[in-house]
Image (cartoon, coloured by chain):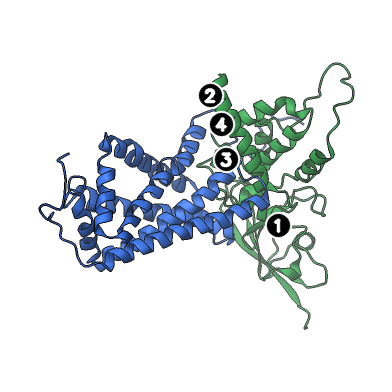
Chain colours: A green, B blue
Amino acid sequence: MAAKKSVLFKIKRQANPKAEPRWEEFELPWHSGMNVISSLMEIAANPVTRAGRTTTPVTYDSNCLEEVCGSCAMLINGKARMACSALVDKLEQPIRLEPFSKFPVVRDLAVDRGVLFENLKAVKAWVPVDGSYDLGPGPRMTMEDQEAAYPLSRCISCCCCMEACPQFNEETNFVGAAAISQVRLFNTHPTGAALKRERLAALMGDGGIHECGYAQNCVEVCPKDIPLTRSIAEVGGAVMKQAIGDLFRK
Amino acid sequence: MSTANPPALLDVEEGVAPLRAGQGHSFFLRRLHSLSGIIPVGAFLIEHFISNAFATRGPVAYAKQVELLSSFPFVVGLELFGIWLPILYHALYGFYIWYHGEGNVTEYPWAGNWMYNAQRWTGAIAFFYMVWHTWHLRFSGVHILTHPAAAFGKVQLEFQNPLALAFYTVGIFCASWHFAYGLWLFAAKWGITTGDAARRKFGYVCFAIGLLFILVGAATMYSFLNTPLQPLEPVSGTESFVMR
């Protein structure tokens, strides 16, 4: 096989949140083991377009470079995924890089994913242990619960599941699969379960779990292989049980 | 250094709004939409396919079944509250859901995403088919509630038009598909089939249910097409009908 001599990138640029987006092309010499983030680093070291014009380095979020921090999610050839684990040799060229389409652009490929943080707060995605005295050790968790909870705890807040979801948009304001899965995680936790009813009640609000259309893109794009459709089904059942129970309790 | 105004760089657009925890009525409306697809709309679909399948046993058996259905007390009330209003709610809220969704099957061409889109298209086609079908068979021409014996011939007359025949075929196919996948969606969303294996197995069950509906519909259509044309006017003495 003849080695590829160069790698072509088409990158959607936007100078600031209000600016009109524009496309720029970059050509890099090919070498083995390239990924999208390493390519963006090379562009930053020498920000010259394919046409030879000097430009600004491309802005993007990244941190860990090993698919555990969730920062570098972007649209790569139209699909939501992590740039650090997107190997250049496995991508069709020219490689199209765009910022997430459903999150406000800050600059270039960097977007504001604050909505997930707001949603995690809205569903109380934490274990309530803060207090003025030592609460002592919590109850033990069964092996079975641990095994169910661990995959859920792998969420890196990259928001790929939300970007790929046809129901996540400004019309529905759907909460998204990540937050629903975190509800399952913290409701499974013996101490976290103290807030179970509040979390399920939160998901009955506008933009809640009912907005899910079960297109199942979330579970396909999730870089951490979190069983998101299972979480939606389980939390959906728990929400329904609580809603029907509330008809008689309230 | 602190400034009075946040830097302009952070002045981003609004984007998707956060969850309105516990606020609003969309949960009730959406779950009512989901439930109405099973009860009463799905239940009616089962009844409708079974009743029409009496056509496979000939015009007399078909007339008897139509007569049985039209003999129910408060039949118009049953139709209104058990069939028409639930279908209207399910359809109109369904269009509302479709309008608010943002299909992306081009970018993410996966099975579940295709089915998401197909559920919207089959629902819409089935709805427009049902409006036309109800208007033709229930509200125009011979009144089959008072003339059950004319029902068989009325359907046959309808089938004389190849376009109408094609619309029936498409309508039966879409309604069967929409109901079968709707059952699967209901089980997944209401937390009945939570596990991946359970969802996959129930998928086979729903596929079989959809296929069964299509086959029953095909057998029924075949009977209407392969029986000599029945008269629309009741033959005196052979029919016992009461004005309702």
Residue located 58% across and 60% down the image? B111
Q: Amino acid at mark 4?
A: Gly
Badge 2 density bin: few <14, some 14–19, many ≥20, Cα 10 Å: few
Left or right, residue A220 beside residue B109: right
Residue A46 is situated, as x and y percent measured from the top left of the image, at: 77, 63
Residues at marks 4 and 2 on the same chain? yes
Between residue B228 and residue B158, name the one nearer to us.
Answer: B228
Q: Are marks 1 and 2 in contact (CB under 8 Å)?
A: no
Q: Earlier in the sequence, mark 1 or mark 2?
A: 1
Left or right, residue A82 beside residue B186: right
Q: Which residue does the numbered mark 2 point to in the structure image?
A: A247
Residues at marks 1 and 3 on the same chain? no
The label number, if any, that marks residue B190 in the structure image: 3
CA distance separating discs 4 and 3: 16 Å
Chain that bears disc 3: B
CA distance separating discs 1 and 3: 50 Å
Quadrant placement of the C terminus of chain B: top left
